[in-house]
Amino acid sequence: MSANYDEATQRELQTFVEQETAKAQMQNTIHEFTNRCWESCITSAKSNQLDSKETSCLQNCVGRFIDTSQSMMPAYSVLRRLTTAETANVNTLSVEPALVVT
């Protein structure tokens, strides 16, 4: 971050960037998931409606995605808190000159 901003503004900008990054990652995940389920479940595009097998497959695929996402979120939250805490600790560390004995 630029030294032209006070500490509160820098934190606000950092939070904004983290939130936008998380949004972009989620959109990317949804896009990948949609492609994966489509490729796995849709066998033909002969009509403008899905048959019962395709519908069932998509529902199962979506269900697995939701279950996986929900089970991963608590772990991701813990990891994010740890990473944020480590970053805060690194940013507050002061480096003392080493004492050299000869």
Image: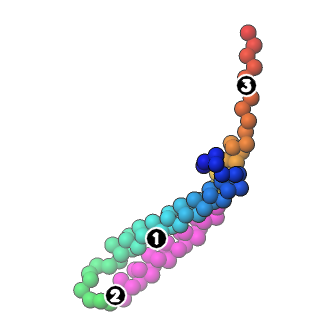
Mark 3 — residue? 97
Q: Amino acid at mark 1?
A: Ile
- Eye-nearest disc, 1 or 3: 3
Q: Are marks 1 and 3 in contact (CB under 8 Å)?
A: no
Residue 49 seen in the figure:
yes
Give the Cα distance between marks 1 and 2.
20 Å
Where residue 39 appears, as percent x and y from the top left, is: 33, 72
- Eye-nearest disc, 2 or 3: 3
User: Looking at the rendering, which quadrant does residue 15 occupy?
Assistant: bottom right
Q: Observer-nearest residue: 73 or 71?
A: 73
Q: Earlier in the sequence, mark 2 or mark 3?
A: 2
- Residue beneath the point at 74% across and 29% down: 96
Q: Earlier in the sequence, mark 1 or mark 3?
A: 1
Q: Amino acid at mark 3?
A: Pro
Q: Amino acid at mark 2?
A: Leu
> Tag 3, which secondary structure?
loop
User: Looking at the rendering, which quadrant does residue 74 occupy?
Assistant: bottom right
Colour basis: rainbow
Q: Earlier in the sequence, mark 1 or mark 2?
A: 1
> Tag 2, which secondary structure?
loop
Q: Is residue 15 magenta?
A: no
User: Looking at the rendering, which quadrant does residue 79 occupy?
Assistant: bottom right
Where residue 51 appears, as percent x and y from the top left, is: 33, 88
The stretch of residues the image draws in magenta is: 50-77
Quarter of the picture containing the C terminus is top right
Mark 1 — residue? 30
Magenta stretch, overall SS: helix
Give the Cα distance between marks 1 and 3.
49 Å
Q: Residue furthest top?
A: 102
Mark 2 — residue? 50
Where residue 67 appears, as percent x and y from the top left, is: 54, 73
